[in-house]
Image: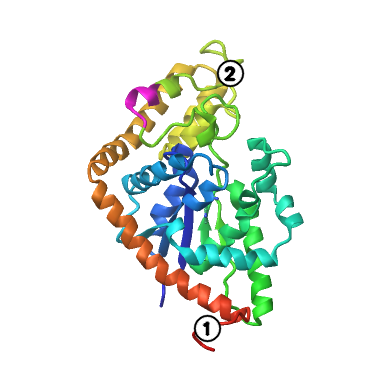
Amino acid sequence: MAKPIVLTGDRTTGPLHLGHYAGSLQTRLKLQKDHDQFVLLADSQALTDNAHRPEKVRENILEVALDYLAVGIDPDLSTICLQSHLPALAELSMLYLNFVTVARLERNPTIKDEVRARGFGRNIPAGFLCYPAAQAADITAFKAALVPVGEDQAPIIEQTNEIVRRINAQAGSEILLEAMALIPKAGRLPNPDGKGKMSKSSGSAILLSASPDEIYAAVRGMFTDPNHLHVQDPGHVDGNVVFAFLDAFCDDLGEVESLKNHYQQGGLGDQAIKKRLDQVLQALIAPIRTRRAELAREKAFVIDVIRRGTERAKQVTEATKQEVAEGLGLFSLSRA
Ligand code: TRP
């Protein structure tokens, strides 16, 4: 039996950070073993709010690919492919846009949040407003059943499935598959300063390529409990960034539980919990950083991984585009 298909992707706007690791990379590492997994370097989507900074989008393709390979996404198990080199995705996007209203795009909660965060006001690039339809094209072109993403992406998957139902209804057959978002149970990782969720734009994200000193400095400066002034004071665990990180990255759940209890009772200082977190993060990132540095010296290999993956993805996505064009009743010169 064919393996279930998984599709995920990342905008190529910067190297990946621990938020990506907790939010989606870990899931991908598990899924690649018994699923047919495609991982999309979403450079076209990155361009929807970076059209005047193409070098940022272009240069980060390799950075993100290095992150994938360094964390253990295995090109023999997962297909890493480049969005802008898959014309079927752009063609499907154009078709899907006829089944989406502007009002529905404007109401999409993810779009609303992102428009606000970018301060677009009324000057939203049309490509940006329409990216949910393009992302629907990404997901459906691969006939993905599962899409591991952060919780912020849930409304995009919801809108994808609306488009799927409309296309299938128009075609009168189940050409496209509804997809399920796989959202990690733990919420998104906070920034070290406790203000907002970790993101590339926050400027304080801990990168997967962070040096030992950068990790140490980020942990040392982490927001804890501002009222926990003396070691013997009882401290709060909720909203405490150090514990949010221990929850996400310390494998020994029992240890985290007992640290939390001790901290809440009093007698456990911020320095001690930060020291433990520093150990956990150093141990997590060190092998990733080493592998990444090795791969960075093998650029031709990395480019070849992307090239081969994109070739395979091209076959899959072209086939779906043909089916959709036919299903929607478009003219075909080759059949005329
Ligand atoms: N929107 C995703 C993000 O910002 C990136 C992305 C593009 C994606 N295409 C995708 C994610 C398809 C999942 C499936 O991170």
312, above or below 333, in the image: above
Q: Residue at x 36, y 48 (%)?
A: 65
- The residue wearing badge 1 is 333
Q: Residue at x 60, y 31 (%)?
A: 196
Query: Was residue 215 drawn as part of the magenta stretch in this picture?
Result: yes
Relative horizontal placement of residue 180, taking residue 276 as reference (left or right) = right
Task: Mark 1 and mark 2 in contact? Answer it, CB < 8 Å.
Answer: no
Q: Residue furthest right?
A: 103
Helix, strand or loop under label 1: loop
Is residue 77 among the parts visible in the rendering? no
**Which residue in the rendered view is the most extreme toward the top?**
230
Q: Residue at x 58, y 63 (%)?
A: 93
Q: From the Cβ of disc 2, is ligand 1 less than 8 Å away?
A: no
Give amino acid for label 2. Pro
Q: Secondary structure at mark 2?
A: loop
**Magenta region, residue range:** 210-216
Please state if 155 lies on the left or on the right of 217 as rendered: right
Question: Which quarter shows the C terminus?
Answer: bottom right
Residue 111, disc: none
Q: Nearer the viewer, residue 130 or 248?
A: 130
For label 1, count other residues whose C-alpha is less than 10 Å away and answer few (under 14), some (14-19) or many (20+).
few
